[in-house]
Image: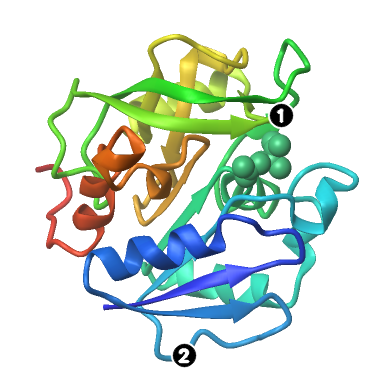
Amino acid sequence: MKFAVIRFPGSNCDRDMYNAAKKIDCEVEYVDYRKTSLEGFDGVLIPGGFSFGDYLRSGAMAKVAPIMDEIKRFADEGKLVLGVCNGFQVLTEARLLPGALIHNDHHQFICRNDSIRVNNHSQFTHLYDIGEDLTIPIAHGEGHYYCDDETYQSLVDNHQIMFTYNDNPNGSYKDIAGITNEQGNVLGMMPHPERALDQLLSTDDGLKLFQSMITPYEKGE
Ligand SMILES: NC(=O)CC[C@H](N)C(=O)O
């Protein structure tokens, strides 16, 4: 399996994403935001950071970058797209995922290890147990997930909520930390699994997420 790590001006977790793909013995290449093709890739990783300096809103300028039409086409084909932190913000801005990420309710940038719970199985989470608690770092100023009640109900009904916070750090609606699209092939999450791959860095709880991506999964398992 070959991954593309998308690089925007201001991306700063691109190297960690690259290393995550290497850690699971996959091929990986950086792809510049001005490119318009993802030919030859099987999965897309949109890293964290401050794309275009978070101007306007985080992800608001990245969503109109040339590569985005190709990422939408890629997702429509059912291929895997993972957006972490700023990547999640880009995916909601691009409407590849429902809802929005707004400023943390306390208006502080927050950076710490956090406890999140696995809520559902998907192509991204099936190697975890449902209900399993993971320690994963968070680092964001605009990580407060917001959606209306109708959207929330559809997320619940379609089993799209993958992760919730055990100790909500930002005011996210219903403690939501990560969701997929309805088809289950696009995941956005604020916590950083790519920074949780080695006990030397205090947790390797993110490893199974990347391993899940490359392990066959039948929906509903
Ligand atoms: N680590 C990151 O991706 C930062 C995310 C984002 N720019 C924020 O501060 O909310």
List x then y, in percent, for residue 110.
64, 23
What residue is rendered at 58% in x and 70% in y? Answer: 6
In the rendered image of this protein, does residue 103 appear above or below residue 210?
Answer: above
44 sits to left or right of 64: left
- Neighbourhood count class around disc 2 (C-alpha, 10 Å): few under 14, some 14–19, many 20 upward: few
In the rendered image of this protein, does residue 63 appear above or below residue 200?
Answer: below
What residue is rendered at 22% in x and 65% in y? Answer: 24
Residue 146 appears anywhere in the view: no
The CA distance from mark 2 to mark 1 is 34 Å
List x then y, in percent, for residue 85.
57, 43
Where in the image, quadrant-wise, is ligand 1 located? Answer: top right
Which residue is more in the foreground, 199 or 38? 199
How many labels were placed on the picture? Answer: 2
Quadrant of the drawing holding the C terminus: top left
- Neighbourhood count class around disc 1 (C-alpha, 10 Å): few under 14, some 14–19, many 20 upward: many
Mark on residue 39? 2
86 sits to left or right of 167: right
Q: Secondary structure at mark 1?
A: loop
What residue is rendered at 40% in x and 82% in y? Answer: 41
Q: Nearer the viewer, mark 2 or mark 1?
A: 1
Say whether marks 2 and 1 touch (CB < 8 Å): no
In the rendered image of this protein, does residue 101 appear above or below residue 211?
Answer: above
Check mark 1 vs ligand 1: CB closer than 8 Å? yes or no.
yes
Mark 1 = which residue? 141
List x then y, in percent, for residue 70.
59, 77
205 sits to left or right of 185: left
Check mark 2 vs ligand 1: CB closer than 8 Å? yes or no.
no
List x then y, in percent, for residue 188.
49, 45
Q: Amino acid at mark 1?
A: Gly
